[in-house]
Image: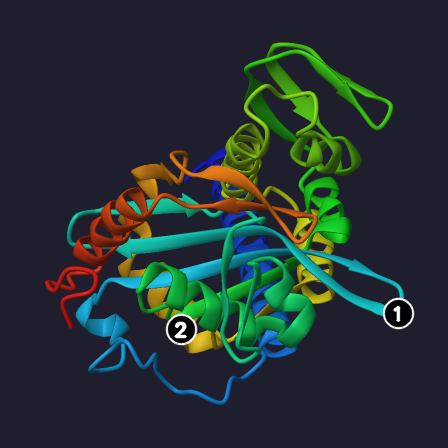
Amino acid sequence: MSNKLKFTIRLAIGIIGISLMALTIYSLFFLKQVTETAKEIHVPMERQVSEKREEPIVFQKKDPFSVLLLGVDERDGDRGRSDTMIVLTVNPTLKSTKMLSIPRDTYTLIVGKNIEDKLNHAYAYGGIEMSLNSVEHLLDLPIDYVVQVNMESFQQIINALDGITVENTMAFSEEGFSFPKGLIQMNGEEALAYVRMRYHDPRGDFGRQDRQKEVIQAVLRRSASLNSLLNVKEIFDAIKTNVRTNMTLDDMIDIQKNYREAAKDVEQLMLTQGHGKWIDGIWYYVVDDEELAHVSNDLRLHLSIEKERGSE
């Protein structure tokens, strides 16, 4: 064997060894970050399973499940209100996810407070659990998990991802930022302003809900292409600060393992047939009962719950 060939072999072995060592270090770092982050953001709830379920979810059996995403606008000295309320139903057998954005001004019963008020006030009254229970009542649907995101600081996550790209359907300006029509890239501050705008949108809160969905999907797409330890650390730090959930690390691992295909097909549902109404000097959004029943049944079937709304 020539010296040149021996050198080439030693060089190749050296490169492979260094690569394996780097991969091992990265894997250990990643595992440590995931474990610490999951522990930090986990908030246990009193209930173990929704009253609207006969049996708890078993991820290993690929049971369909639901998640309530709460985007909370927190302020100093104030718990704040849930600016964003999105229900996701995930069905791995159908390989699909349904996403329902609920208007924040929806007039409904606040469970635990025993009053009718805007749905987004439930968080101000009783935090995550009151929001979850009130959404369950409105939709007559089991909500298995909840993820709370601090919207004001959500921009940190987007900045840690080096920004996101969305397809904007209308040109507008908001909070000093200009958003032209078409494909645009945004940092965290711009994305927050992009999501919050609704008064210049002819579709009002419904246009806002569309932008929420676009930003969430853009974050998911961007998260799938992490390319450096620095980015990973910044993202985990942002998640620790801004996210709370009743999911455990084991839950997250099982979802990643068994439900990945369901994220590829996301269908958006909306409640658009209701009407605005002034009650005691306050404006509310009153949902259409027939549309609400239709959407509820759609989500129930997606969760493999056979009984229709109101038939239990």
259, 120: nearer the viewer: 120
Q: Is residue 237 left or right of residue 118?
A: right
Residue 64: image location, x then y, percent: 24, 62
Quadrant housing the N terminus: top left
Quadrant of the rendered structure where residue 79 is? bottom right
In this orientation, which residue lies closer to the viewer: 294 or 75? 294
The circle on residue 202 is none
Kindly identify which residue carries mark 1.
77
Mark 1: which secondary structure?
loop
Q: Position of residue 246 (x, y in %)?
A: 51, 76
The C terminus sits in image quarter: bottom left
| Residue 32 visible in the displayed image | no
- Tell me the residue at 52%/50% (across/down): 106
Mark 1 in CB contact with mark 2 (< 8 angstroms): no
Residue carrying label 2: 251
Q: Residues within 10 Å of mark 1 (few under 14, many from 20)?
A: few
Horizontal and vertical percent position of residue 99: 38, 45
Residue 52 sits in quarter = bottom left
Separation (CA) of disc 1 from disc 2: 33 Å
